[in-house]
Amino acid sequence: MIGVILAGGKSSRFGSHKSFYPLDDKPFYEHIYHAMIESGIERILLSSNKMLSQYFIDDIQLRGLKIEVIVDEVSYKECGPLSGIYAVMHAVPNEDYCVISVDTPFITPVAIRYLIKMAGIHAKNDAIVYRDNKQIHRTIAVYRYHLIPLVKQSLDSGNLALKALTEENTTLIHINRINSTPFWHENINTKEDLNRVLNIRSGYYGTYNR
């Protein structure tokens, strides 16, 4: 299993590059890195665009982390998460990829370990993905390498939604099956999202410690 941190977005709604935004004295991407390491993933790749790649390389070196940076291919630049997944699959062929978006900094090792466990149990399925009652969290998922032709086909046709990868032969796991913090899956698109989750976290730990 290879861990993949998707970090190629513009962060336009956040107001700054959220990958590097400090949360508990660590940037978003480092939180995901440590959760992956604690879950047992040994090789971790970070997918980014050309503009940000050197910033990541320098910051990773400064922090002493073991992360390989993969740059989106020029022909598929600015094509969203799908281009990041394709770049990783093309550069580093492997059977399985545990894909986590950089805007999910509250992800826990418990959630990642369970995802990997389900990938082993449902070995014949192309994708193993978390969901809740409202949506499918396609950037908290395991994708198989043999999806790469479909990924490329979607990019070439301009169909950039990850939905194409989960329309068939997919295992959906409800987030309620994870015995972890209630906010581990939260997607942070804006600073308002971050403040909302931090308030939830503060209340959760306050209640837990009583």
Image (cartoon, rainbow, N blue to C red):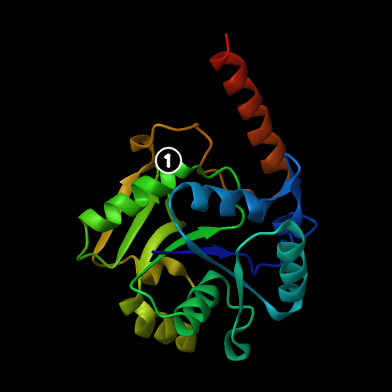
Q: Is residue 87 left or right of residue 128?
A: right
Question: Of the residues shown, which amino acid type is indicated by label 1?
Answer: Val
Compared to residue 179, the image places residue 123 above or below, namely below
Q: Residue at x 80, y 58 (%)?
A: 16
Report the front residue among 54 and 16.
54
Secondary structure under tag 1 reads helix
Q: Residue at x 45, y 57 (%)?
A: 41
| Quarter of the picture holding the C terminus | top right
Report the front residue among 167 and 53.
53
Q: Is residue 122 left or right of residue 140?
A: left
Residue 85: give x, y in percent of width and height. Answer: 49, 73
Residue 186 is at least partly visible in this image? yes
User: Please, which residue is most extreme toward the front here?
Assistant: 64
User: Please, which residue is most extreme toward the top here?
Assistant: 210
Q: Residue at x 72, y 56 (%)?
A: 18
Residue 4: give x, y in percent of width and height. Answer: 51, 65
Compared to residue 153, the image places residue 183 above or below, namely above
Q: Is residue 122 left or right of residue 38?
A: left
Q: Is residue 41 left or right of residue 144?
A: right
Q: Quadrant of residue 69?
A: bottom right
Answer few, some or many: residues within 10 Å of disc 1's Cα (few below 14, many 20 plus, some between 14 and 19). Answer: some
| Quarter of the picture holding the N terminus | bottom left
Q: Quadrant of residue 166?
A: bottom left
Q: Quadrant of residue 164?
A: bottom left
Residue 130: give x, y in percent of width and height. Answer: 38, 50
User: Please, which residue is most extreme toward the right here?
Assistant: 15
Residue 156: give x, y in percent of width and height. Answer: 47, 89
Q: Residue at x 59, y 21 (%)?
A: 205
Report the front residue among 127 and 121.
121
Residue 189 is at least partly visible in this image? no
Residue identifier under label 1: 110
